[in-house]
Every structure is written in structure tokens, then in C-alpha cells.
Image: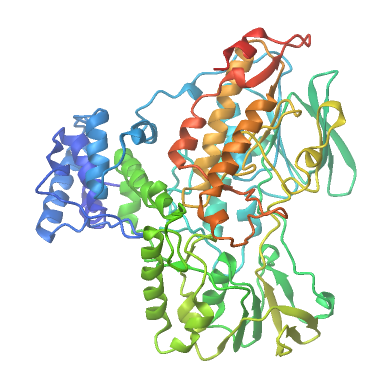
Amino acid sequence: MLDKANLQDAISGASVPTLACLLVHLTGDPRWVRPPFRFGRLRGMDDNETGDLPFTQQQEIRDAALAAIDAWLDGAPVTLPDPGDELLLDMMSATLGEDIPSTYVPMIRHELGLAEDPGARPAAVPPGFTALIIGAGISGISAAVELDRAGIPYTIIERSHDVGGVWLENRYPGAACDVPSHLYSFSFAPGRWSRHFADSREIHRYLKEVAEDHGVLSQIRFGLEATAARFDEQRGEWEVLANDSTGAEQRLRATILISGVGAFNKPRMPDVPGLERFAGPSVHTARYPDEGLALDGKRVILVGNGASAMQVAPAIADRVAALTIIQRSPQWAAPFTKFQQSIPEPVQDLLDEVPLYRLWYRLRLSWAFNDKLYEALQHDPDWSAEGSINAINDAHRKGLTSYIRKELGEAQELLPQVLPSHPPFAKRMLLDNGWFRTVARDHVRLVTSGVTEVREDGVVTADGDFHSADAIIWATGFDVVNLLAPMRVEGLGGRLLHDEWQGDDARAFLGTVVPGFPNFFCLYGPNTQFGHGGSLITILERQTHYLMSLLRQMLEQGCRTVEVRREVYDDYSQAVDDTHRGMIWQASGVKSYFMNSRGRNVVNNPFRIIDFWKMTESANLGDYRCLKPTGVSVPIAAEARA
């Protein structure tokens, strides 16, 4: 608990720029974000907690914050609850050390709780109107909480025994999130985090607590896996088939169907001969056993070098006798200054009990993991330097190269093996958990030739070498382009969703809705993952926000079903593809997990986060065919579209 006894400790460990913003609110004086205070810019993924201020200025802000918070704890009111748009923008720009465009003001107001929340009012729900959610991960929990606020009855079916989705399943050594904990959390449930970047177990506990606190757990039917969904045109509702743990089939019906199954839920194992022959433990990171693996003193092969592998290798290196890493291609990894860094208890108390401090702390973090990087991803047709796509991207390349050299220490002979040739951000930018220092260790061997065969006691690689092992860990990623597979989804006229998507070419308006599939909403759908930053939870909340805006309008107009118009869907799909053509993922020619068999990026969102934020702020009912229970189209829907 934050009190006078530990307030001093909390202030001494707090973010100085965040305290400056808090002081403007508490004192009403904007001088804390104006000269002589000149705050430095964020550096990479670091939130620059000192603001680069001289020590005397840092102490001046800390002393003033101590007095102001102490007074607030004693009951003093917040002098300036709403500083207004101009001052809010000044505060954001000053403490980030760069000019933030005024277009971000609405988002700033929203994040600080200074904007009206239409989700606070209930919807006019007719009798029998229900929702069925598939999946009790982040998407399912987000949708459930908002449906409950609106007064819409819902049920969740979940194939596993617990909530959490990817954070229930991924429990391999070192598993953690590469987005700051205070960003990777629901806006309505901040959470109390012990580390700046939480591990998978803490995130799972958080999600379970949210589900418990918001009454979601009681609405979940565990052990039910959806196999098929069919839209019943006669009744205007969805019928879902699901198998329970015994294999018995159950049928469920609902007015609307929400997919919260996510994308990173189908582990991808390489198709190599002999997989079943290996005598020791052989596991994919997403299927790591709850009890762990006995790796102490063992010879371990780690296949892969993506996000999971970069977490596993440093986590097990001290335990194993020998570690062989089989790398498919080098990856860029940025410095990770707060890796495994704990948040002191007094600072946790400050974040818990001073909402304005927490909100500004989260808001400033969002810029480091937000549109700040967007310009580095734009292809400059006049740029000719190899290994980059524009001047900003080239600066990133030079800085990251220097960092990798430093991390390798005396093992500079490894540089050709670990230094990527592709531009930074052409693949997912990873955060360095000690990967480069690990591969440089004496008992670690880096192999750059792929696995061609698995034998009883090891693997053979394409160069003909045999690598012995007692255990194999496959960090080979997921099938993310075949969204919703293998579930069969049947819409109007019996049309299958995977026929609409031609297999792996998934598309959806705002990543959420598809023509021909009324009242079907896909959270974390096609092109909703931001490759340049952002928190997945923030994006899912925006999709849910849009969904609730649509449902409220739908119910107010007396609609039974809504179906996105084909031209709206096509126009959005074209905009996604056109924007991608000028961005790094298409321009670099690099292939990664987000590319389908046609070379189209079906995972990443090409827009700025602020642009998607605006797109999802309010639904336009005119973008939909809106039908009443009688089957009669509501004219206002067709006329409303601009």
C-alpha cells in the first residue's frame, strides 16, 4: 500500500517524465513540461526514465512530486483533471522529446480516460439475442467483458481446461512477452506486475484474475472444441458443432458468433523423416510439458532462432552440457535493457494507487512501441544502399549491427552467421534476451544448415553433418496464415469461409467481418497484427470497441443480422494490399510466417496504429446489409453509407 512511509522510495524509482506529467495535473502548473526542463527522446525500446535531465532537475521534479502526491493522498483535489487538447499534446511531446502530431490527441484523451465511453451504456437487447464466443484467450475475455457491460448474454466454449490461450500453452523456459507489461494489459484491468516484461506464468495468472473478477469464468464451457459453424438463414442465427473431451458432439446456437481462436495456436513441425524415431524427449515450444524437461547436463538441440528460440537458448544454456542451435536464417534483435528487471514494490504501489501516474506511464510507453517506427518501414524507391529500404531504416541497421558486434565479444568470427542480410523490421523485430552472448559461449554451437533427418540419437543437417542429442526442442513457429483451420465455417448459401479465402488468403474488413457471413465477427483476424509495434491487447480492444459500436446501432435499428457489404470489404482489402506494396514486408522480398502461398501478407496491418484507431472508433451501419427478423432490409443502412 502506498503511504507516507514508502512514498519516498516509490518516487525515487519512478519515471521522471511521467512524474512531470502527473505534476501538471496535480498542481495545474504546466512549467513542469516546459523549459528549462528539456526531456530527451526515447531510445529504441527503452522508455528513458530519467528523461536525460540533469540530476538537479530530476531531483526537483521528484521533490515536487513527493509533496504533491502526499497532499493528494491526504485528500487534496487534482487541480487540473483535464488539461485540454493543446496542453495534453504539449505534455506528450515535451516528455517524449519530439513533436507528436495533433492527430493523436483523441487517442491520448481516450487512453487517459478523458473521452466519453459509449460502452458504458447498455444496449437495447431483445429477448433471445445471444452471443457465442469461441476461445477463452485474450480475444474471448475482451469480448466477454464488453458484451456483459452491454447486457448481451454470452457463452464461451474453450477446448482447453483453463483460460489464457497462447499464455496457457506456452510455458517453455524463458517464455515471456516482448511488450511491456503495462501495455500488454487490458485498459479496464491494469494488473499489478512484478516485472517490466512479464513471463508467461504471470500473464496467465493475470488473464485468469481478469476472467474471475469480471464474472467471465462462470460463462465458459471448458473442454469443448468447435469443429464447424453454420449460419441458419431461416432462423437468422448460428449453429456451432463442438466435440467434448470424450469425442461426443454437442450443438450450440446463438444470434452472433465471435471467433477468439487467435492465430498462434497451431504449432508447425517441420516435415522431415524420422521425427517419431528420436529416443529422447522431442517437443515443440508450444507443447512444452507442465513439469518441464530434465535438461541438466544433457546434450540439447534447439531448432529455430525466432522469438521462442531466442528466449529458450539463454534460459537453458547454464543447465545443459552442450547446446546445438540450428538456425534457419539470422534475425535482428534489439537491445532489451529491462530484460528480467523487476519493478520495485513501492513503484508497483505507485502504479496501483495513483491512476494518473499509471495512465501517463502507459501512454508514454505506447509511443516507444507504437507509430514511432512506422517511417522506418516505408520503401524509398530512390534509396540504393544494400540491406535497408530508407535512410531511417539504414540508421537502425547500423545501430543494430554495432550492438551485435559488441554482444559477441571475442567471438567475432560468428558475425557472418548471426548478422542478417535483410533490412531491419522485414521480419518481426526481436528483443535480445542474451541470444548473441549465448551463441558465443564455448559449449554452444550454431549450425546454419537445416534438419533433413531425425535419428534415434540426434539429427542430420543438409550439410551432411550428424548432431547427437539427448533432447530436441522445436522452436519452429506456427501456421498463422490458415486462419480458423481446421474449423468449417459455412455462411449464406452454404458458402465456406475457406473457399471465400481460397485457403490461406484470409481477408476481412477491419480484420473482423466477411461478406456472406452475417453476424460473424473474427477477433485477431486477417491483417490485425502491427509489425511496427503496438500491443496486441490494445488492437483487440479496438476491434471489440468497433464490434460493440456496430451491435448497439444494429439493435437500435431493430436489426436481427448485419452483413458487411461486398464493396466495403473489397475496398478495404485493396487498401491493405496497396499500402503493403510500399512497405518493407513486400518491398524487401523477404519471406516469413506472415506470407501466404501467394506471397501476400495476411497477418500484418500496414496502416499506422492511429489510422486503425480512427477506423475502429465508430461503426458505420451503412457499411452493412441490415436485416430485420422478418427478413426485410432496413433502408437506413443502405442510405447511411457516405
Q: Is residue 321 above or below residue 98?
A: below
Vertical relation: 617 (above or below) 484: above
Q: Nearer the viewer, residue 415 or 386?
A: 386
Quarter of the image where the C terminus is located:
top right
Q: Please, is residue 321 above or below residue 482 in the view?
A: below
Q: Position of residue 190 (x, y in %)?
A: 44, 43
- Horizontal side of residue 604 vs 118, given as left or right: right
Quadrant housing residue 27: top left
Q: Colour scheme of this structure image?
A: rainbow
Residues 536 and 508: in front is: 508
Extreme residue in the front direction: 382
Q: Is residue 472 found left or right of 231 in the rendered image?
A: left
Which residue is located at x 42 percent, y 48 percent?
A: 370
Left or right: residue 482 compared with residue 106: right
Q: Is residue 74 left or right of residue 164?
A: left
Residue 342: image x %, image y %?
38, 62
